[in-house]
Amino acid sequence: MAYLCPSFQNPMLELAPTKRHDEARQGEAFAPFAVDPVLYRRRFYIESYGCAMNFSDSEIVASILQAEGFGATRNEEEADLILLNTCSIREKAEQTVRKRLTEFRKMKRRKPGMLVGVLGCMAERLKAKLLEEEKLVDLVIGPDAYRTLPALIAEADGGQKGVNVLLSRDETYADIAPVRLNSNGISAFVSIMRGCNNMCSFCVVPFTRGRERSRDADSIVNECRDLFEAGYREVTLLGQNVDSYYYASEADAAPVTFALLLEKAALISPELRIRFSTSHPKDITDDVLYTMKRYENICKYIHLPLQSGSTRVLQLMNRSYTREWYRAKVDRIREIMPDCALSSDVIAGFCTETEEDHQETLRMMAYAKYDFSYMFFYSERPGTLAQRRYADDIPLDVKKRRLQEIVDLQGKLSHQSNREDLGKTFRVLIEGESKKDASAWKGRSSQNKVVIFPKGDTTCRAGEYVDVHVTSCTQATLLGDIVTR
Ligand code: SAH
Ligand code: SF4
Ligand code: F3S
């Protein structure tokens, strides 16, 4: 996992696993972990890997389990049920999970009644094979089958292995109120759609998550409103390709597009920030851009994954845009919202990539002046179009060298972008104390940049907005002072 710019959130990318919840930051809310022994007969421990969709799914799973009398615990040692919500995006992601499973295998020998389940994309990719490969796994459940967890647990309690990896065309878990697991009580993810129809040739997601489907718009807006009323001040609308969100109900006269959904969410309150991820360059519309411009509380930040700057490679990747198309999108965003931040995902060393292709990627990054990027070298995934059609022919040392060049360039671009913010004032949502300095707050600007500033003698609290004047910066962070009104 090239985890290169950890201070910036990209909900579509591998986040640090929510592993030991007790390692979580001070001040985080853990309401669901207050286990009442009368209400909850058994305890579950869940660890999430991969993108924010998985983290969001774990909150659905927690809700399903709570209704069945399972209380969440942060301590794996006291769990009756251990669940790993897994990711298959790169080989490294799967290796991490396998390592964790060996640790749980040892634990299971000590605690024979304890159940271990694998959820998410690895469960979907490997299906029952996972039971052969990882002997002590009791449950294998794909992303569309979480409603069947209670029945499968009952089977596993009776000594059977429980497997359900059926993908669905309509499951969105729209009616399930997620139990917020590892929340700071200020920012939350809200799933707006599931699956992906894009079939980028390198990507395993269409196989592990199935067909794209959009969630009922009212249920999304209601969830955002409930979060706001519970004190949350930022929601991130999640989908693999949010711009193709489309929900038509019999009750509504007009179908809800992504632009309309954004507007509905923005209208809940000007004090609720709206973010979203991920946009596909081929699908993001002017309508979305103008809606973003119209509402101050829709954050001026777009994650617009490039993947490669070479049209030839983009075609092999099945990304359905060219270098020129991508450049025109960047121009359009800048024209409509000059203050909008841009970030990207970049893959180094995809099949047949030449030095010139690689240079084109670097040139496009410099053109787009990304504020930050998530950068990887290509990892061949079984069953994908690329694995079936093309040889993974770029040697690992070349992939790594190209990745390093991409990382170095991004470092410079991020630093430059931050330097351009010196002397400016940004509205910052306070997320909590700075990890390194208890006398400072950490928050984010609308552009998703981390801002650190002294608490001073003001009476601010996490969840409040303050104006911060930027006085200095590092490559990853803006530093400044509160502007007193
Ligand atoms: N739906 C999102 C991406 C989800 S996966 C989107 O289209 O942007 C997140 C990122 O992982 C991708 O954008 C891509 O850069 C990277 N990725 C996906 N498959 C990969 C692979 N096989 N090897 C290396 N990186 C990969
Ligand atoms: Fe994967 Fe492409 Fe779908 Fe993103 S848009 S999840 S990269 S297939
Ligand atoms: Fe997400 Fe990984 Fe699956 S990135 S969709 S958890 S393969």
Image (cartoon, rainbow, N blue to C red):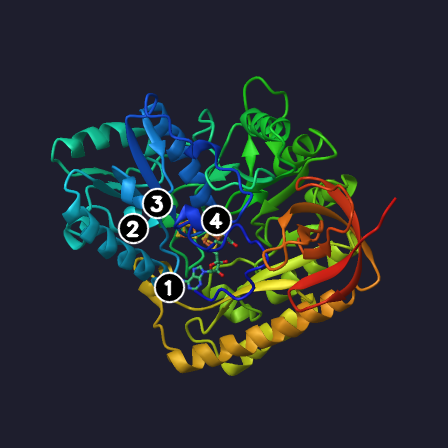
Of callouts 2 and 4, which one flags the residue occurring earlier in the amino acid sequence?
Answer: 4
Whether ligand 3 has any atom under 8 Å from the Cβ at mark 2 is answered as yes
CA separation in Å, label 3 and label 1: 22 Å
CA separation in Å, label 1 and label 2: 16 Å
Residue 284 location (% of width, % of height) = 63, 48
- How many badges with numbers are in the image? 4
Of callouts 4 and 3, which one flags the residue occurring earlier in the amino acid sequence?
Answer: 4
Please name the residue shown 28% across and 47% down the image.
123
How packed is label 3: few (under 14 Cα within 10 Å), some, or many (20 or more)? many
Q: Are marks 3 and 2 in contact (CB under 8 Å)?
A: no
Please name the residue shown 57% across and 59% down the image.
305
Whether ligand 1 has any atom under 8 Å from the Cβ at mark 1 is answered as yes
Residue 255 location (% of width, % of height) = 60, 28
Which residue lies under the disc numbered 2?
Answer: 125
Which residue lies under the disc numbered 3?
Answer: 120
Whether ligand 3 has any atom under 8 Å from the Cβ at mark 3 is answered as yes
CA separation in Å, label 3 and label 2: 9 Å
How packed is label 4: few (under 14 Cα within 10 Å), some, or many (20 or more)? some
Of callouts 3 and 2, which one flags the residue occurring earlier in the amino acid sequence?
Answer: 3
Q: Quadrant of the N terminus?
A: bottom left
Please identify, in this view, whether the residue under mark 1 or under mark 4 is nearer the observer: 4
Please identify, in this view, whether the residue under mark 1 or under mark 2 is nearer the observer: 2
